[in-house]
């Protein structure tokens, strides 16, 4: 699925993150990968479901991104769940570190995509939702879907 306006080819999205968190800000980061991992990404063999980011020693790492081993990779395959270093400016990392430490935010990978030949990660600075927030957003989504369905049926009658 390629986006014509931005030149992005989306590999995977973390839909669970939008269900569990409020996304306040979005950031773009590069990701450090090996060749067989990139080939697995091109085949779409990745899962972002339970992933999150940690800041250690002034660097940011993505934990829990599952990239399946490449079938023809033999000895060059890496551990599917290894921590992967994210590539961001030091200033951005320190800003994120301050917000995560003070305000109780989390940094969550929202999507993985190709930007040209580079693999990029869209990170979200997120606050956790409570159960009643999840119910509210589900009710809002259902009502929007019903309104659209109703208007579509009304337009078909004319």
Image (cartoon, rainbow, N blue to C red):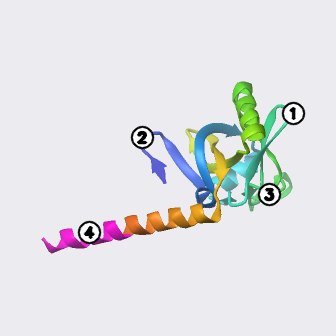
Q: Residue at x 75, y 59 (%)?
A: 72
Is disc 2 placed on a helix, strand or loop? loop
Crowd tier of the residue under label 3, counting other residues whose Cα lies within 10 Å: few below 14, some 14–19, many 20 or above:
some
Q: Which mark is residue 152?
A: 4
Query: Which comes sooner in the sequence, label 4 or label 3?
Result: 3
| Residue 113 seen from this side | no
Query: Which comes sooner in the sequence, label 2 or label 4?
Result: 2
Q: Which residue is mark 1?
A: 57
Q: Which residues make up the magenta segment?
A: 146-158
Nearer to the camera, 13 or 124: 124
Nearer to the camera, 154 or 86: 154
Q: Is residue 124 above or below residue 41?
A: above
Is disc 4 placed on a helix, strand or loop? helix
Q: Which residue is mark 2?
A: 5
Q: CA distance from mark 2 to mark 3?
A: 32 Å
Crowd tier of the residue under label 4, counting other residues whose Cα lies within 10 Å: few below 14, some 14–19, many 20 or above:
few
Left or right placement of residue 11 versus residue 32 in this view:
left
Is disc 3 placed on a helix, strand or loop? loop
Q: Which mark is residue 80?
A: 3
Q: Residue at x 62, y 61 (%)?
A: 16
Q: CA distance from mark 1 to mark 2?
A: 36 Å
Query: Which comes sooner in the sequence, label 3 or label 1?
Result: 1
Q: Are marks 1 and 4 in contact (CB under 8 Å)?
A: no
Q: Is residue 142 magenta?
A: no
Q: Position of residue 81 (x, y in %)?
A: 81, 56
Q: Are marks 2 and 4 in contact (CB under 8 Å)?
A: no
Query: In the rendered image, which quarter is residue 15 located in?
Result: bottom right
Q: Position of residue 123 (x, y in %)?
A: 64, 44
The mark lying in front, picked from 2 and 4, is 4
Q: CA distance from mark 1 to mark 4?
A: 54 Å
Q: Position of residue 18 (x, y in %)?
A: 58, 56
Q: Residue at x 68, y 57 (%)?
A: 48
């Amino acid at each position: 699925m390629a986006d014509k306006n931005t030149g992005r080819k989306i590999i995977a999205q973390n839909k669970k993150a939008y269900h569990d968190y409020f996304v306040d800000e979005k950031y773009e980061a590069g990701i450090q990968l090996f060749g067989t991992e990139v080939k697995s990404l091109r085949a779409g063999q990745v899962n972002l479901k339970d992933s999150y980011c940690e800041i250690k020693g002034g660097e940011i790492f993505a934990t829990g991104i599952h990239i399946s081993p490449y079938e023809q990779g033999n000895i060059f395959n890496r551990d599917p769940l290894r921590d992967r270093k994210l590539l961001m400016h030091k200033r951005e990392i320190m800003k994120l570190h301050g917000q995560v430490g003070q305000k109780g935010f989390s940094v969550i990978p929202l999507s993985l995509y190709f930007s040209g030949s580079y693999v990029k990660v869209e990170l979200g600075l997120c606050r956790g939702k409570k159960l009643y927030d999840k119910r509210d957003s589900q009710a809002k989504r259902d009502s929007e879907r019903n309104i659209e369905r109703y208007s579509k049926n009304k337009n078909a009658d004319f």
